[in-house]
Image (tube, rainbow, N blue to C red):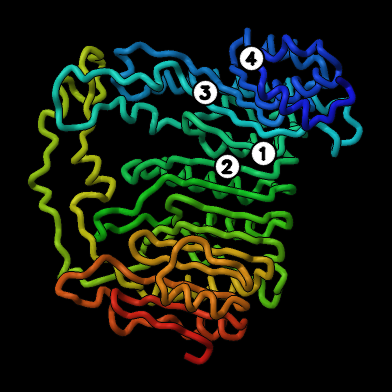
Amino acid sequence: MNKIPPEILLNIVDGLDAPLARYASVSRAFRQVIEARTFANIQLTSTEQSLTKFDAIFSNTRRRYFVRELEYKVELPDISKKRFKKLQSNREAAENNRVYTVAVSALFTRLQKWTDATEDLEKAPSFRLTISSSSPKDSYRPESPHQHEHDPAWEVRNSFKYIEFNELEVLPPLLCVNEFDHSGRSLHPNVMAVINKALPRMKSLLWELFTAPRRLEALRADLRASMASVLADTEFSNLEALDIYYEDTDPLNQDWEPENLLDANGDDPLSLAVNRISRLPKLRLLELRGTHILSPAVFDVDGENRDAWRFLEYLYLDVSKTTPGGGWYFTGDREKTMTSDERIESDSEASVAAFDSDDSDASDFLPDFRWRKLDGDIPWVDFRLHPDPITLNPFLIAMARAIVRMPALKRFACGFTDAADIYYYGPGVEKSGPMTIDKSNFFDSALSHGRWIMDFETEIPFNDEDPLFSDWVLPPELTETLEAAGHRIFLTRGYRHVHRCQPGC
């Protein structure tokens, strides 16, 4: 049995019925294959019983090398079904913070010992760590005691509370973790700062942040500023892939005046932090999904330094139509747009009990109309479909100047919701996904060049009108920069205006 190739043993193990542990005594080689399969994906909870069992299993140091993914579930305190109908209280939040702090600290203290006696770190255990957090009631869906047109409060009871560490500023460093992500309850960026600094060998990070709505202005600003600090101050010396999902939306009321997010020097800390991250020497992929409010500073270049982004291969940005300075990247004809009639909406009798009251026998219902108005979503006003040359052109020019300084770049995508999609493919990179015949022909004919597909188009306009201002064109500085680099551009400008742009067009 010990002479059978591992590939054959794996096929044999795949055909066995669980539990596999009972077959481990067949031979030493068979035991190693079974242990490699058994311990590849470990699921662990923060209960004392689960942690004690974990300690016993992995007191055998040889088993630690089989782990490829460790899923750690932090069990937060349960709540009553009555209390579930209310928004999370400050007392509940404080207890959640305490439990989460103890649980994460317990895990990191254990895992640090996995590499204490390892002389060669390249041969140390290495795996993906996922930390989730939830209470038993997080999946509970009660029946509302009264029919009501508004959403019940339990839909968002935990949404505006972010878990924070309870007086914990440093965690033991883990040299065995190469990937990290989290799920469940929302974490404050300050928590991510402590965790990230404790994972010096991390190569891949998936970070999800569900931001606060605009009516909670101070909390919203704090979350964004804290996120910028994490990206600006964490070393990330081994990071190769960073994927950030930032849950946010643009205001549906496009008469809305966005918040000003610039600091006292007129800079946007988040855009500067993203710029810094994009230049990390080992970073290959940077993906910002969701809706990110970014300025041209995200593409800042250092004078004649042409090696700023020497290694970046994939860059994807989902950008808000609002600017960090409190403006918009797009404009339009406000007089021609339709506006929803807000008078038909009301919050009258939003709940049998007063909203967020102590009466737990009745569900609270969300004051949808008032909240949506404070969030900039009522009235619905949609007219910002046209590039604003004052704000958007500097962004596009900075983008072009940065991309031509990314010699390893294979794919770039930048999207503005319902307004523009910009794609770049490096020389020789094949297209991904279906394209129109015109785009496909352009793409294939310029395969040896960097190729841009820029779509500035909207839904089919009323009365066959051009949805874009007729006098808007790509800024000359952009086309000159790309021409000098030998790039090609396919521009869709408006519903019926398709232009194929080569150098000199």
Q: Nearer the viewer, mark 1 or mark 3?
A: 1
Q: Does 180 sit above or below residue 387?
A: above
Residue position for label 2: 206
Q: Does 346 sit above or below residue 355?
A: below
Please report whichever mark, 3 or 4, sits nearer to the chain's N-terminal start.
4
Q: Nearer the viewer, mark 4 or mark 2?
A: 4
Q: Residue at left 44%, top 46%?
A: 221
Q: Nearer the viewer, residue 459 or 265?
A: 459
- Spatial CA distance of label 2 from label 3 is 22 Å
The amino acid at mark 3 is Asn
Q: Residue at left 69%, top 77%?
A: 304
* Circle 2 SS class: strand
Q: Position of residue 193 (x, y in %)?
A: 61, 39
Residue position for label 3: 97
The amino acid at mark 4 is Ala
Q: Nearer the viewer, mark 4 or mark 1?
A: 4
* Badge number at residue 179: 1
Q: Residue at left 18%, top 40%?
A: 369
Quadrant in which residue 73 is drawn: top right
Q: Are marks 2 and 1 in contact (CB under 8 Å)?
A: yes
Residue position for label 4: 18
Q: Nearer the viewer, residue 85 or 265?
A: 85
